[in-house]
Image: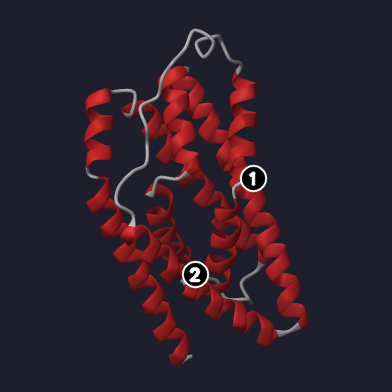
Amino acid sequence: MQYILEFLGLMAVFSIFIVVPGADFAVILRQSIVHGRRAAIMTGLGMGFSLLFHISYTILGLGLIVSKSLMLFAAIKWAGVAYLVYLGIKSFREPGFKVQDIEVTAEDRKPVSMLKCLGMGFITNALNPKPVLFFLSLFSTLVHHDTPALIQFSYGIGMATALVAWFAGVSYFFTVKAIRDRFIASGKWFNRITGAALVGFGFRLALSRAAD
């Protein structure tokens, strides 16, 4: 039951994180418009593999920290709470989605291999510093250090699956201009809702840490 609750807690925060538009979202949107749904889905799959890469070294790194100093691990937990609150405030203050109209040229229309799309997704996510900080804060704050590494990796597989599923949905629906425009138009309020939710999670975790 402990592991189920941990996983649900991770997914609750992660689900908010993945729907907030960022660099990954912009790449998926462009791929879906320029090269079609299949290319965009493969790009999202590459991002899912990259996510497992981020999670793997996060788990291994935190395990090493725990073995050296529980005090340092506790400090990282509090930093994680602060980072979640920071992300929430930043999202809340965003005016809207910064997605510009995508101009498609003849050069862009050239066929692209699915392997290249997979690689593009992996590199885009791997070079993005946001997941690094997010997973460090998320795992240190929500996952107990005694949770076996294998269980933690299974959490990561679930999170990567959720990311791929979200971007598959984006790839499918955002090729419809009316849906895309409506989603972008609601950006200001969407950011406020997700930002408030992240801040709420951060304060709730801070209170629970104080009680521990």
The residue type indicated by label 2 comes to Tyr
The residue type indicated by label 1 comes to Leu
Let me know if residue 175 appears in the view. yes
- Check disc 2 and report the residue beneath it: 83
Whichever of callouts 1 and 2 sits on the residue coming sooner in the sequence is 2
Let me know if residue 36 appears in the view. no
Using the rendered view, name the quadrant where residue 34 is placed: top left
Closest to the observer, 109 or 166: 109
Question: Farthest residue in the bottom direction?
Answer: 211
Using the rendered view, name the quadrant where residue 102 is placed: top left
Q: How is the image coloured?
A: secondary structure
Give the residue at x 28% y 23%. Answer: 176
Q: Position of residue 182 (x, y in %)?
A: 21, 35
- Check disc 1 and report the residue beneath it: 127
Q: Is residue 34 above or below residue 193?
A: above
Q: Position of residue 119 (x, y in %)?
A: 65, 30
Give the residue at x 49% y 7%. Answer: 106
Give the residue at x 55% y 68%. Answer: 137
